[in-house]
Image (tube, rainbow, N blue to C red):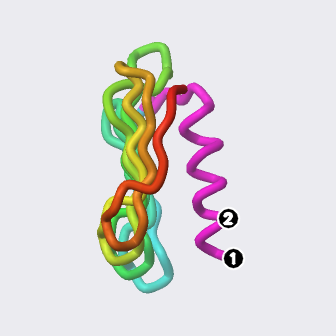
Amino acid sequence: MKKILSALLLLMLVSTPVLFAEDVKTYFPNGKVQMETSGNTMRQYYENGQMMSEVHSNNNGDPTGVGKMFYQDGKLMREDDYEKKIWKQYGPDGNLMAEGKM
């Protein structure tokens, strides 16, 4: 359930224009980084330290480049290519499960 909620939160963040006005870091109780913004990039992490997601935005706050989501073991879960307007979903084994247009 926690993974599903995290994925839904990320999808909301990716679909909503966001401007990262300043560098920010938030932390888990264990001291590891939970989320960080730097310039126009936002990264979220699992409590084990693996990256959960990475999203870039342009100066208008619109997603740009390639956004990525990862499984807790670090394997790629999803890629959203905002320039080509396509997305790809991968299974835990790394195999392409689905793809489509945005």
Majority secondary structure of the magenta segment? helix
Q: Magenta residues?
A: 1-21
Neighbours of disc 1 within 10 Å: few (<14), some (14-19), many (20+): few
Residue at 33 percent of width and 77 percent of height: 73
- Left or right: where 12 falls relative to 38: right
Residue closest to the eye, 82 or 25: 82
Instruction: Report which residue position mark 2 lands on.
Output: 5
Q: Position of residue 56 (x, y in %)?
A: 37, 33
Residue closest to the eye, 98 or 3: 98
**Element marked by disc 2:** helix
The verdict on residue 48 being magenta is no
Residue at 33 percent of width and 59 percent of height: 76
Three-letter amino acid code at the position of disc 2: Leu
12 up-or-down from 91: above or below: above
Q: Quadrant of residue 4?
A: bottom right
Instruction: Report which residue position mark 1 lands on.
Output: 1
Q: Looking at the image, which residue sits at the far bottom? A: 30
